[in-house]
Image: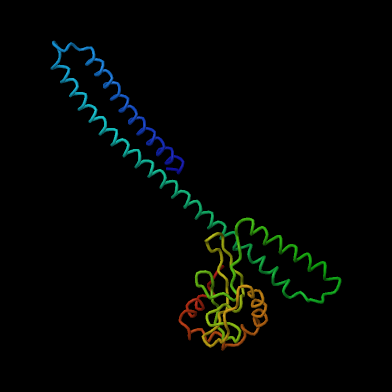
C-alpha cells in the first residue's frame, strides 16, 4: 500500500470517529429535550410515577451516551496520534532517501572541486600575463562550483587546527609536530562536507602525534595553520616513519587503519 493510500485511510478513520461522536451527542440531546417536554406536559396526578421512570431512563441513556462519546474521543485521539507519527515516519524516510541520493551524486562531483583547488594551489604567484586569464578563469569556476553547493545546504568541514573528531575526520596517519598539540588535525588531504547535521564525506587528514609539542591554534588562526600544514604535506606521504607512530595512540590507529577504505 502506498504512503498516500495509508494517509487517506488514516484521515477516513479520524473523520468516521468524529462523525460517530457527534451523532452520539446529538442523539442524547434530542432524547433529553424530548424527555423534558414530556415531563413539562405530564399530569402530576395521573402519570407522576411514569414520568419519574422516564427521567431515570434518560439519565441512564445519558450516562451510556457519555461513555460512548468518551470512548469515541479516545479512539479519535489515538487515530490522530497514529496519523501524526505516520507523517513523521514518512518525512524521515523521505529525508533519508534524499540524503542517500545527494551523497551518491556528490561522490562524483566533489572530486571536481578537489581538482580545481589543487590546480589553483600549484599556480605560480608570479605567473606571466599569458597565464593570468587562465588562473582567473579557474578561480571563477571554483567559486561558482562551491557557491552552488552552499545554495543547497552543503558546507565544508573545518579540519586543520581542530581536534580530531572520528565522526567527521578520517585519519590517514599520525605525525609529531612542533606546531600542533597532540590529537589536532595538522594537514588536510581531502576536504570533508556535510549537509545540515548529516555527513556527506569525511575529511581525510593527518593528525599530530603524541610527541607533538605545539598548542591548539585559535580559531582565527585556522587559515594560517592550514597554510603551514600544506607546506609540509609533500614530505608527510614519503617517509615510512610517519605511519609508524600511528599505533602508539589507540585512538588514531583505528581511523588510520581504515583510511584507505574511506569515502569513494
The reply, left or right, for residue 216 in relation to residue 18 is: right
Q: Which residue lies at the image location 26% right of the left edge and 22% below the top edge?
A: 32
The reply, left or right, for residue 159 in relation to residue 24 is: right
**Identity of the residue furthest to the front in this view:** 44
The reply, left or right, for residue 23 in relation to residue 94 is: left
Image position of 231 with respect to 146: above or below: below
Q: Which residue lies at the image location 18% right of the left edge and 20% below the top edge?
A: 54
Tell me residue 170's x, y (percent).
Answer: 54, 73
Image position of 62 with respect to 167: above or below: above
Q: Quadrant of residue 146?
A: bottom right
Tell me which colouring the rendered structure shows. Answer: rainbow
Tell me residue 190's x, y (percent).
Answer: 61, 72
**Identity of the residue furthest to the right in this view:** 129
Of the pair 241 and 40, the residue shown nearer to us: 40
Q: Quadrant of residue 44?
A: top left
Of the pair 196 and 213, the residue shown nearer to us: 213
Image position of 33 with respect to 146: above or below: above
Quadrant assignment for the C terminus: bottom right
Tell me residue 99's x, y (percent).
Answer: 53, 57
Q: How many marks?
A: 0
Of the pair 27 and 125, the residue shown nearer to us: 27
Tell me residue 20's x, y (percent).
Answer: 33, 30
Quadrant assignment for the N terminus: top left
Q: Quadrant of residue 37?
A: top left
The reply, left or right, for residue 239 in relation to residue 246 is: right
Q: Which residue lies at the image location 67% right of the left edge and 66% below the top edge?
A: 113
Image position of 184 with respect to 130: above or below: below
Amino acid at each position: 500500500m502506498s504512503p498516500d493510500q495509508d494517509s487517506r485511510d488514516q484521515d477516513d478513520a479520524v473523520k468516521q470517529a468524529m462523525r460517530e461522536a457527534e451523532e452520539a451527542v446529538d442523539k442524547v440531546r434530542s432524547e433529553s429535550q424530548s424527555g423534558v417536554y414530556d415531563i413539562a406536559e405530564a399530569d402530576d396526578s395521573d402519570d407522576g410515577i411514569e414520568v419519574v421512570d422516564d427521567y431515570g431512563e434518560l439519565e441512564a441513556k445519558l450516562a451510556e451516551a457519555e461513555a460512548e462519546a468518551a470512548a469515541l474521543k479516545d479512539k479519535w485521539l489515538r487515530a490522530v496520534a497514529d496519523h501524526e507519527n505516520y507523517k513523521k515516519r514518512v518525512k524521515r524516510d523521505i529525508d533519508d532517501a534524499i540524503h542517500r541520493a545527494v551523497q551518491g551524486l556528490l561522490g562524483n562531483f566533489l572530486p571536481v572541486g578537489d581538482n580545481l583547488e589543487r590546480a589553483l594551489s600549484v599556480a605560480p604567484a608570479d605567473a606571466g600575463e599569458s597565464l593570468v586569464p587562465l588562473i582567473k578563469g579557474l578561480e571563477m569556476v571554483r567559486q561558482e562550483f562551491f557557491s552552488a553547493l552552499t545554495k543547497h545546504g552543503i558546507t565544508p568541514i573545518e579540519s586543520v587546527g581542530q581536534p580530531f573528531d572520528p565522526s567527521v575526520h578520517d585519519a590517514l596517519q599520525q605525525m609529531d609536530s612542533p606546531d600542533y598539540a597532540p590529537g589536532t588535525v595538522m594537514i588536510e588531504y581531502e576536504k570533508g562536507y556535510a549537509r545540515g547535521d548529516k555527513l556527506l564525506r569525511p575529511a581525510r587528514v593527518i593528525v599530530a602525534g603524541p610527541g607533538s609539542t605545539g598548542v591548539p591554534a585559535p580559531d582565527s588562526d585556522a587559515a594560517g595553520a592550514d597554510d603551514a600544514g600544506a607546506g609540509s604535506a609533500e614530505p608527510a606521504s614519503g617517509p615510512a616513519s610517519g605511519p609508524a607512530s600511528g599505533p602508539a595512540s589507540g585512538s588514531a590507529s583505528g581511523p588510520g587503519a581504515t583510511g584507505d577504505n574511506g569515502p569513494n
